[in-house]
Image: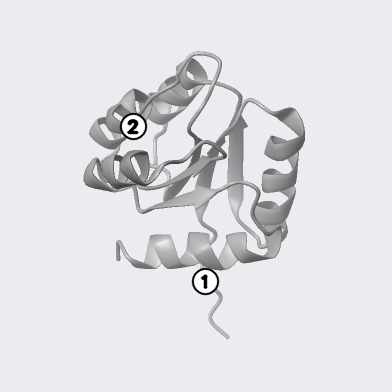
Amino acid sequence: MWKKPPLKILIVDDESLIRWSLVETLSDSGNEVVAVPDAQNAVQVVRDAVVPFDVVLLDFRLPDSHDLTLLSRLRRLSPGTRIILMTAYGTPEMSQEALDLGAYCVLDKPFEMNALSPLVVKAHASHI
């Protein structure tokens, strides 16, 4: 029986409990998950990746990033990676701008953890 290969996922969120929950949820689905707390580490991990990440879950507000600049930078560094922007501070204008900059979707916090794995798989499948 053929088994789908694990996805390589990057989680960027400054809240340790959310980061932990996302890692647990996505690792339980058999994925390779890396988690970082800020923009600086996210850029470094993406830049250093030998194999690009399939999906990035990116928090909108981080200690060192409060706008969509990080989204743009990650898209330039890894154009094939799907980025799901997570935010508790979304506006329709910000969401549209994120989509225009190449985000796969904008996920409003709080969200149901059980909806996350199917969303990540769908985001990745949209690239294939």
Residue 29, image x, y percentages: 66, 62
Above or below residue 7? Residue 103 is above
Q: Which residue in the protein does label 2 denote?
A: 74
Q: Is residue 87 left or right of residue 23?
A: left
Question: Residue at 55% of width from left, 59% of height from top?
Answer: 6
Q: Total of numbered circles in the picture?
A: 2
The one of 115 and 79 positioned closer to us in this rendering = 115
Place of residue 21 in the rendered image (x, y in percent of width and height, measured from the top left): 74, 45
Viewer-side label of 1, 2: 2
**In the depicted structure, whether residue 29 falls above or below residue 43:** below
Q: Position of residue 11 (x, y in %)?
A: 56, 38
Horizontally, residue 104 falls left or right of residue 34, namely left
Rendered residue at 60%/55% (across/down) = 31
| Residue on which disc 1 sits | 4
Q: Residues within 10 Å of mark 1 (few under 14, many from 20)?
A: few
Q: Amino acid at mark 2?
A: Leu
